[in-house]
Image: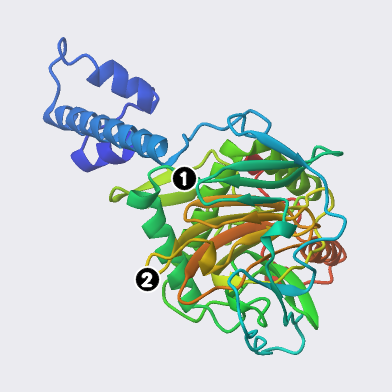
Amino acid sequence: MISEAASTVGYEIHQSQSISQSFVTRLGTADRVQLSPSALRLKEMFQEYKTTTAKRRRKQRKVADRIGFKEKDIDFRGLPDNISVVFVDPLPIPYPPKDHIVLERHYSTLPDPPRLRDPTCSYLHQYCQLDPSKLQHTVYEDQDAIFLDRTTHEPVVIVLRNFAKDYYNTVGPKASDLVLKSIEHYRSHFVLRNDSGKMATAGVSGGQRSNSLFGWVRNLKPRSDVNDHQRDISSLFGYFYALVRGRIPYISDSFERAMKDTGIPRLDPTSSKHFTLPFDDIDIKFSQHPLAPPEGFISYNFSRGIHNERHWDNCPWGVYWNLVRQHPNGQIGMDSGASFYNATYGIRVVNASNTCVVWNRSNLHGTGKYEDRLEQIGIAILLSDTTKRCWEKYKVQVKSGELPKDSLLWEPGSEDEDQS
């Protein structure tokens, strides 16, 4: 910076000295040496730069504190220690039952089955009218909770309300608007198309079922700002994951081990190596936080009946952040539906805005049916068994030379070590 500024004002840096030495020894003695006009101007420019940088850093620290974390790397382990832990046993018979859509409001006549949009996707069409007496626990919209299996002491469900600080003034509107705009610009390539609402992949993809190829998903409609939009989405996931690491490091450690053991890249399709948040009319750059796992999803009004999934070895966690839960008439309680269920343990989580939920994906789980005009917007991270198999296949193809170099988005081992 000094070298470039010096050339603009005609200040000559002595070849026998480094830039820093020249600047300190010659310009730092203004009270004893008569400086030339160019040297005075350079000194003024440097002082302006220092003042501006200091102001920016103070503003960055202030914003980081307000939204829930600092830029310093986090180095502690465990679960939140300010929330009481409940030990639970699995139900003898899971409830709500598998392959059923949960109705949280009473129906005298059951609704028509959901429309079958894609015969190649799984299709859940049976309904279950909820009987709350068959549940073990309900976590209401103003409650935090940690449920652990009584035998293994492993997490079953973790619920954290008020997940991001200063949410309604800063984070929430920007994050939900970004997800909605992204959903609008996606092609028709939504996952689980027979379920209500929309869910789209925002990270890696295994490609077409008939021709799998590991890589970044390419499902945005052509637009001039695709790269900017991808950076914004990956930044939102980077911020989400930073909050997860800060509040539930027990879960993020599992993701970190899985990524380190296999070398899979992080959610960074533009190779920026950082995430940036547009707060307070400046872009706050966070470069010392490991980026999110590569498998991310964004959703609008998405729900799926009771099911379970195969997951990455030793990393069974799904983590979602419910950004918005709203209703035109303010009816956002249980009667509006869309609660989250862990059916293996009979747990219901009443969703709310700015809520983070962690669950074990091998357990039976699902989301209740949306009622009336309820709206929910959210994002989620996980590591699926499908992604792991595609990644392992990809590494074999690269090492064998099966894939041409110009078709590769990256090579195994090319991930920045600072991100691990």
Front-most of residues 345 and 171: 345
| Label 1: which secondary element | loop
Instruction: Locate residue 245: give its quadrant.
Output: top right
**Residue 168, above or below 14:** below
Labels 2 & 1 near each other (Cβ < 8 A): no
Q: Position of residue 397 (x, y in %)?
A: 84, 67
Residue 226 can be seen in this image: no
The residue under the point 80% across, 58% down is: 311
Front-most of residues 365 and 166: 365
Lower position in the chain sequence, tag 2 or tag 1:
1
Q: Position of residue 12 (x, y in %)?
A: 26, 32
- The residue beneath circle 1 is 164
| Label 2: which secondary element | loop
The residue under the point 56% across, 51% down is: 140
Query: Which tag is nearer the camera, tag 2 or tag 1?
Result: 2
Q: Residue furthest top?
A: 32
Decide if residue 246 is on the left or right side of residue 16: right
The residue under the point 41% across, 38% down is: 64
Quarter the C terminus occupies:
top right
Q: Position of residue 272 (x, y in %)?
A: 52, 53
Front-most of residues 232 and 344: 344
Query: Label 1 crowding class (10 Å Cα cut-off): few <14, some 14-19, many 20+?
Result: many
Q: Alpha carbon of mark 2 to alpha carbon of mark 1: how far?
A: 24 Å
- The residue beneath circle 2 is 328
**Residue 246, above or below 345:** above
Q: Position of residue 279 (x, y in %)?
A: 34, 49
Which amino acid is tagged 1?
Answer: Ala
**Residue 359, above or below 65:** below
Which amino acid is tagged 2?
Answer: Pro
The residue under the point 29% across, 47% down is: 280
Q: Report the number of discs.
A: 2
Q: Which mark is residue 29?
A: none
